[in-house]
Amino acid sequence: MSSIQGYDPETLREIVDVRECLDRLDEIGPLRSLPALLERVWLLKVTDQLDEALRVSEQSVRLARMGGTRKDLLRARILHATILQWRRQFAAAEQEFTTCAEEAEGQGWAGIAAFAYQHRGKSRFDDGDLEGARADFKRSLFLRQEAGAGDDELEPTLLAIDAIDRRRVRATVAS
């Protein structure tokens, strides 16, 4: 997802060039491979086309279930859960992130588990559970470091932890 230009420090959401994302959607529109569907889901999400993103994410989960690997299925389910999160369906999103994280950890797939924890943390952050979010980001950071992630892969997690710490300080000062 090279379209990411950064992360909003208040919402933790990706900052993207919307025009570039819409152009890419046009390019991959007719493609039906699992990687193309997953990219399409993400592009629809970041361009705020959540109804269509939900429809395509459900299609990508079905396709991964029928013809993909277990890792493919986990990735598709995690992305589907991010759509639920953005639609403010936090309980359903958290359940899916949790199931995916646990399965990935059980298989020893640290990168996928970190991805699930990172997104569960974002969902908890959106839902106002700062302690839960911080714990998820710390778990994601540990798993990413364990998997040998580079600084660019660690940066979003570190920024998320910093955003929570800043928000907690502001809440303490305000009270």
Image (cartoon, rainbow, N blue to C red):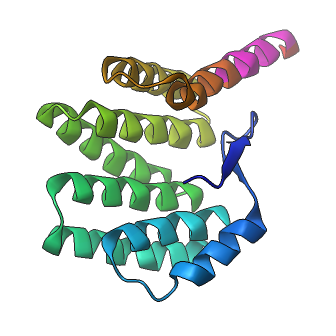
Magenta stretch mostly in which secondary structure? helix
Q: How many marks?
A: 0
Q: Measured from the top left, where is residue 29 in percent x and y? A: 52, 85
Q: Measured from the top left, where is residue 132 in percent x and y? A: 48, 26
Residue 69 left/right relative to 21: left
Can residue 19 be seen here? The reply is yes
Residues 129 and 136: in front is 136
Q: Residue at x 62, y 73 (%)?
A: 24
Q: Measured from the top left, where is residue 77 in percent x and y? A: 32, 58
Q: Residue at x 59, y 77 (%)?
A: 25
Q: Residue furthest bottom?
A: 30
Q: Which residues are magenta?
A: 164-173
- Is-magenta flag for residue 170? yes
- Is-magenta flag for residue 57? no
Q: Quadrant of residue 139?
A: top left
Q: Residue furthest right?
A: 174
Q: Residue at x 65, y 25 (%)?
A: 159
Q: Measured from the top left, where is residue 90 in percent x and y? A: 49, 50
Residue 23 left/right relative to 54: right
Residues 169 and 154: in front is 154
Residue 43 left/right relative to 120: right
Q: Is residue 75 above or below residue 117?
A: below
